[in-house]
Amino acid sequence: MAQSIYMAGVLVGAVVFGSLSDRFGRRVILTWCYLQMAVTGTCTAFSPNFITYCIFRFLTGMALSGVGLNTTSLIVEWIPTRVRTIAGAIIGYFYTSGQIVLAGLAYSIPNWRHLQLTVSVPFFVYFLYSWWIPESARWLVMAGKPEQAVMVLKRVAKLNGKTKEGEKLSVETLGKDLKKEVTASKSKYSVTDLGRTPLIRRISICMTFVWFSTSFAYYGLAMDLQNFGISIYLIQVIFGAVDIPAKLISTITMSYIGRRITQTASLILAGTMILANIFVPYEMQTLRTSLAVLGKGSLACSFSCAFLYTSELYPTVIRQSGLGYVSTMARLGGIVAPMVKITSEYYPFLPLIIYGGAAMTSGIIACFLPETLNEALPDTIEEVENKIKKIKTLSNNGMTEKILLQDAVSTTC
């Protein structure tokens, strides 16, 4: 019950903080979420009863969503296209390190109150240094605050040792360079825009399946930790460590092969590993564990790709709303996953069929997403929609491959 309530908090946080970030900014909401994580996490450690515990866990889950969503957006909107994949992977490795460290902390601090306090107090430090993080210049322009955008860009230029280039920036030059973004800032957007236009609607539908199934299958595996006949602390370390090679492979394939293929392959492979365990006898625990670990690694690839891919697919004006929506779908997957375990009372292998089947189906659906490798980050809905229109027009003229190759070379250079 406590875990389900926590996941419900993560779901609500994705909806609430996703929309608030598009309205009030990435850094402001990120700072608030750090503070909320610190306060509610600390209060959880001192909860006098179960109801109070669940309330604080719900609020902590909400804050977790805000931290994840806004961190992703700031990375995508600040990091140049050529190194965006690598930067995302590096950040992902810190998440992996946290998984491994948590197993050690849980083993060495058996008292749950002390453990909860230990993992919550550091967020007060994160709250303090988050004030130093610059707001997204893209968001400032889209929000109609070009003066602040210029100030932030000059500060970043100075930190990067490009003071002269920064001094040349002004509201006028920024307005000329970002004319379409300034025009778009005068329009109002909401979560309904995620399904208003054809391509954005397709992206939203496909990503609904991708995020739901990735989370759904992941928690299906995670809840089976105690059934592998291995120490739960050791299996937690193994499950965390497999992310290291998994995210490295994901980074390489995303950089050289593409996001769409990476997303598709990781989900299909995860589904295959989960379904394969149906045919392995329960006594062969080593093989069962190995297949589960490979499945977990594939889902780590899927998550790593999904965060970056989703951020590149949605334009700046609705990026946080889009991330909030798909994150909500992921949390629904996390909430539904425990219910599927009940079906094992009828057929022991039925949960694995459902978990694996969902992952494989979503992998096939991901094939219908557009590729974003080496593509400039879109700022408006019109940019996204015009891209597919351009491709269709070129295809009708029999010149699609040639022009796309030229665009890719031009972007890379």
Image (spheres, grey):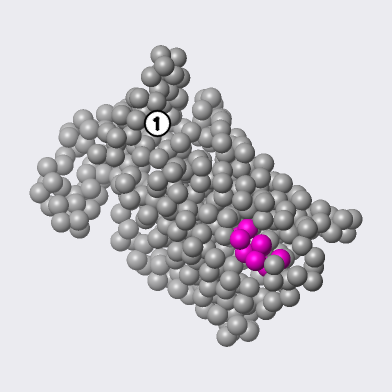
Percent position of residue 215, x then y: 63, 53
Residue 113 in view here? no
Tell me the residue that label 1 is attached to: 380
| Stretch in magenta | 288-296
Residue 364 screen position, x and y as percent: 62, 39
- List the single residue furthest toward the top: 397
Above or below: residue 231 compared with residue 391: below
On the question of residue 246 being in view, the answer is yes
Task: State which quadrant residue 360 falls in.
Answer: top right
Badge 1: how crowded within 10 Å, few (<14), some, or many (20+)? many
The residue at 81%/56% (across/down) is 349
Q: For the point 54% across and 65% down, which residue is it?
A: 242
Amino acid type, label 1: Thr
x and y percentages locating residue 263 in the rendered image: 53, 45
User: Nearest the camera: 182 or 238?
Assistant: 238
Comparing 313 with 122, the one in front is 313
Q: In the image, residue 346 lies at what x, y percent?
A: 89, 55
* The magenta stretch spans residue 128: no
Quarter-wise, where is residue 6 in the image?
bottom right
> Residue at the left extreme?
164
Quarter holding residue 226: bottom right
- Report the predominant secondary structure element of the magenta stretch: helix
Q: Residue at x 84, y 59 (%)?
A: 348
294 versus 119 height, above or below? above
SS for tag 1?
Answer: loop
Report the quarter where the C terminus lies: top left
Q: Nearer the viewer, residue 251 or 60?
A: 251
